[in-house]
Image: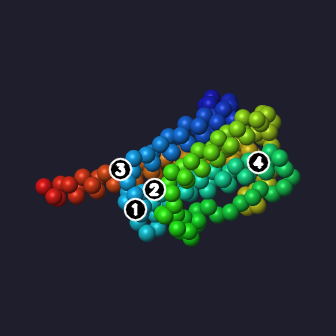
Amino acid sequence: MQLEERDPAGWAMKALREAGGTLVSEFAGLDEAALRHRPAEDELSLKEIAVHLRDAEELALRQLTAASEEPDKRLPVWDIDVLPFERNYRDVDLTGVLSEVRNLRRQTTALLWMLRDWDWRREVTHPYRGEITITMIARELAQHDLEHLWQVRRLKHELVEAANDRDEGLR
């Protein structure tokens, strides 16, 4: 039996703590040019990913709060994937955004720690997906962290490779 099968709440809490902390630390020490660079027109820059993470955390926290306090109401929802392309996220202050991400994650985990076992299994209505549970919301947020952790590391690796190629060309 896998951890998540025995203890879905424990798995989600562990994943949210570890992946979220690691993800935020990945942005340390990067210069503005690296943070603003988009690898392709339809891909996000590192800075846009950071703001997207804030948007995702805010949405998840609002959904978790609604699910725990007003389970009979429909969950709030908005399309966080289009926001980086509609707004000028490359000009935001990264330090402030990462502070917001950490603060929102603290609120999310504090809320989740207060839940009882049956709360995690409580079904609530998502406007597009139908019935989902608090466990599903928490697990999807953790999975979202992991997907963007991979993306951030890939982009950082590509930036290092490009810099190395430039250095080789100068020799």
For the residues marked 2 and 3, what is the alpha-carbon distance in whole angstroms?
Answer: 12 Å
The crowding category of the residue bearing disc 2, from other C-alpha atoms within 10 Å (few below 14, some 14 to 19, many at least 20), is many
Q: Are marks 1 and 3 in contact (CB under 8 Å)?
A: no
* Residue 65 marker: 4
* Residue 37 marker: 1
- Ranked by sequence position, the earlier of labels 1 and 3 is 1
Residue type at mark 1 is His
Residue occupying the far right of the picture: 72
The crowding category of the residue bearing disc 1, from other C-alpha atoms within 10 Å (few below 14, some 14 to 19, many at least 20), is some
Residue type at mark 2 is Leu
- Ranked by sequence position, the earlier of labels 3 and 4 is 4
- Ranked by sequence position, the earlier of labels 2 and 4 is 2
Task: Name the residue that disc number 3 marks.
Answer: 157
The colouring scheme, among rainbow, by chain, secondary structure or one colour, is rainbow
Residue 17 falls in image quadrant: top right
Quarter occupied by the N terminus: top right
Task: Name the residue that disc number 2 marks.
Answer: 46
For residue 87, side relative to residue 75 (left or right):
left
In the image shown, does 162 or 121 lie closer to the viewer?
A: 162
Q: Secondary structure at mark 2?
A: helix
For the residues marked 2 and 4, what is the alpha-carbon distance in whole angstroms?
Answer: 28 Å
- Ranked by sequence position, the earlier of labels 2 and 1 is 1
Point out the frontmost of discs 2 and 3: 2
Point out the frontmost of discs 3 and 4: 4
In the image shown, does 155 or 1 lie closer to the viewer?
A: 155
Q: Position of residue 76 (x, y in %)?
A: 75, 58
Q: Position of residue 60 (x, y in %)?
A: 68, 51
